[in-house]
Image: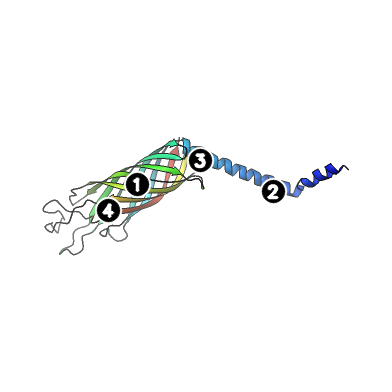
Amino acid sequence: MPRGAVAGRMASPPMSLRVPLVITGLAVLGGATSAAAQTAALDTRPALGAMVHAAFNSDQNVISDKQTTDFAVNADWPVRAGWRVRGEVGRAAWNFDGQAGLPAPLPTERISITRVTASVMRRGYRIPGTYVGGGAGVYRYASELSPLPRRTRPGLHAIAGMEIGSSQGGLALRLEGQFQAVGGPNAAYDPGASPVTGVPANGSSSRVTSSVLLNLVFGIGIGWRF
């Protein structure tokens, strides 16, 4: 047998290794193709989404566990490779109790925060489907009992999340968290307020004592990428 033929046969892997090598190669190729397709979907397709978050805030007058539910809807558009912009509308509400040190406790107050925000988000490169970002928005306080002299306040936020199942567009699962820093109503409690209704004599009261309200939300949702 020619020496070159022997060398060629020795260079080829044994049959027992060929099948595993082929399977491994196909798996790697398939994973790379799926990741590339998902990346392409995130980079080139606009989307609509809806989220349900567990929400917590930092104010000392929030009753007991400080947890509530935050609902949000959003839309995002690709602006360049790896970057998207998002607009979002969301709302959360907490039960606030009376302030410490008062001669008589105030009744429980329900205060909600509705937000309209804009974000810039960057696709994660190490893990397909992940994204991080941040932005700013307008937050609107509403109360059932107490007047709020400064209802509309600015705020900043940061976002981190993952989108699963959008490799070919269509429906996707989203896991996401946000950290929000929102200006408080900046109104001090009025000692002349009624201990029954909590309505102040001069219209200048707020159960939100924080000058900056810190909110943490994280939850699950869906997105439809066109």
User: Would you name the residue on which mark 3 appears?
Assistant: 39
Left or right: 192, with 66 as reference point: left
Q: Nearer the viewer, mark 4 or mark 1?
A: 4
In what element is the residue under mark 2? Answer: helix
Residue type (three-letter) at the residue carrying disc 1: Phe
Decide: marks 4, 1 in contact (CB < 8 A)?
no
Q: Earlier in the sequence, mark 4 or mark 1?
A: 1
Real-space Cα separation, disc 4 to disc 1, in angstroms: 21 Å
In what element is the residue under mark 1? Answer: strand
Q: Position of residue 26 (x, y in %)?
A: 64, 43
Real-space Cα separation, disc 2 to disc 1, in angstroms: 48 Å
Disc sitting over residue 212 in the figure: 4
Left or right: 54, with 138 as reference point: right
Decide: marks 3, 1 in contact (CB < 8 A)?
no
Q: Nearer the viewer, mark 2 or mark 1?
A: 2
Picture quadrant of residue 77:
top left
Real-space Cα separation, disc 2 to disc 4, in angstroms: 59 Å
User: Would you name the residue on which mark 1 appears?
Assistant: 71
Q: Earlier in the sequence, mark 3 or mark 2?
A: 2
Residue type (three-letter) at the residue carrying disc 4: Val
Q: Nearer the viewer, mark 2 or mark 4?
A: 4
Decide: marks 3, 2 in contact (CB < 8 A)?
no
